[in-house]
Image: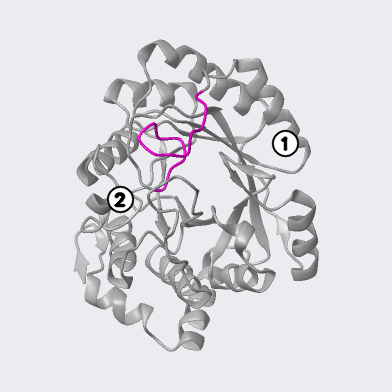
């Protein structure tokens, strides 16, 4: 399906690709991946919670919502120097991208000076910068762009049809609007979704089609496997099977061939073999470190050992101090 803006995909086509015989799907995805990236290079990123808990949103998967039962204590926004100290540690351990997340519906204007200082400081360390702060106004997006922010993360989470089953305090359109403001400000877009929230295969594929059909597809696409957290409405959600997860990675690579695919939340529960299949299918970024916001993540030594077994090397950063 074509349009003046480039290739566009509809749901029936994407589903037909998703349901191809697995070996054919993986072969095609890997050739596409190899055409645009070095298949033996994976970007190492770190994610820091710069403001934890107390979020007024009702996202059913999140332990940081005041509406859920996870009872996570709220914190204030971290001091800039503490954030930069953590960023230095991340850089020295091999990370080339630093992501900072705050549990907000949206940032307050009074916090923007500190946030901009964090962006400046991390870039001065020679790392790519990413922020995830919830919804943004047009002015806030422009301020982040002027501060030098490389990426803004704002996941659409799931399909538009399934979205109301997961989140009621903001709409699917709200998320798309924020992505448009980020793009208009000149910041690269990081947006993906979470698998395992009770959605159908059609919902999962529809989520990727929505991203691929944006005026410009996201340069960065996180693919998360739900981490069921005690006290949240999705604590008893049925896990996604490994083959279905790999199919989604492969489909994402085919629909968005030049995007960096981030194997994000849920890796702690993935086998080495599953992660290897995801790298083959087109995933080329991971979050390193033992914590991913409030959830467990594989130890850095375990990731480096896996890289050694697979012959993978860290991807270099495009940012220079």
**Residue 304 at x, y percent in the picture:** 78, 56
Along the polypeptide, which appears first: circle 2 or circle 1? 1
- Point out the stretch of residues depicted in magenta: 61-74
**Residue 232 at x, y percent in the picture:** 42, 46
What residue would you read off at disc 1? 91
What residue would you read off at disc 2? 166
Vertical position of residue 128 compared to residue 249: above or below: above
**Residue 11 at x, y percent in the picture:** 24, 71
How many residues crowd mark 2 within 10 Å: few (<14), some (14–19), many (20+)? some
Q: Residue at x 34, y 31 (%)?
A: 185
> Quadrant of residue 263 in the image?
bottom right
Whole-angstrom CA distance, mark 2 to mark 1, is 35 Å
Image side of residue 172 versus residue 75, left or right: left
Asked whether the beta carbons under mark 2 and mark 1 sit within 8 Å of each other, the answer is: no
**Residue 153 at x, y percent in the picture:** 43, 40
Image side of residue 210 versus residue 267, left or right: left
Image quarter hosting the N terminus: bottom left
Tell me if residue 233 is in the magenta stretch: no
Task: Tell me the mark number nearer the camera, choosing from 2 and 1.
Answer: 2
């Amino acid at each position: 399906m074509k349009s003046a803006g480039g290739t566009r995909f509809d749901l029936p086509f994407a589903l037909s690709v998703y349901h191809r015989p697995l070996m054919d799907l993986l072969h095609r995805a890997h050739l596409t991946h190899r055409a645009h990236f070095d298949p033996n290079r994976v970007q190492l990123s770190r994610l820091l919670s710069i403001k934890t808990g107390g979020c007024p949103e009702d996202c059913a998967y999140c332990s940081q919502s005041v509406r859920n039962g996870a009872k996570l204590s709220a914190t204030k926004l971290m001091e800039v120097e503490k954030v930069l100290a953590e960023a230095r540690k991340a850089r020295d351990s091999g990370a080339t991208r630093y992501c900072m997340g705050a549990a907000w519906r949206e940032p307050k204007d009074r916090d923007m000076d500190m946030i901009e200082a964090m962006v400046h400081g991390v870039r001065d360390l020679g790392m790519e910068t990413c922020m995830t702060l919830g919804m943004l106004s047009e002015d806030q997006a422009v301020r982040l762009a002027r501060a030098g922010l490389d990426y803004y993360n704002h996941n659409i989470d799931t399909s538009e049809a399934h979205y109301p089953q997961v989140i009621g305090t903001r709409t699917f359109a709200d998320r798309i609007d924020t992505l448009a403001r980020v793009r208009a400000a000149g910041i690269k877009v990081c947006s993906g979704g979470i698998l395992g929230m009770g959605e159908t295969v059609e919902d999962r594929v529809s989520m990727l089609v929505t991203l691929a059909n944006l005026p410009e597809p996201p340069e960065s696409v996180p693919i998360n496997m739900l981490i069921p957290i005690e006290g949240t409405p999705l604590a008893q959600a049925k896990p996604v099977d490994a083959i279905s997860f790999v199919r989604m990675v492969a489909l994402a690579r085919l629909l968005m061939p030049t995007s960096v695919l981030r194997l994000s939340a849920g890796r702690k529960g993935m086998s080495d073999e599953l992660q290897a299949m995801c790298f083959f299918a087109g995933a080329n970024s991971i979050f390193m470190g033992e914590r991913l916001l409030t959830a467990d993540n594989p130890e850095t030594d375990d990731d480096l050992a896996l890289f050694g077994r697979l012959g993978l090397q860290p991807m270099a950063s495009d940012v220079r101090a």
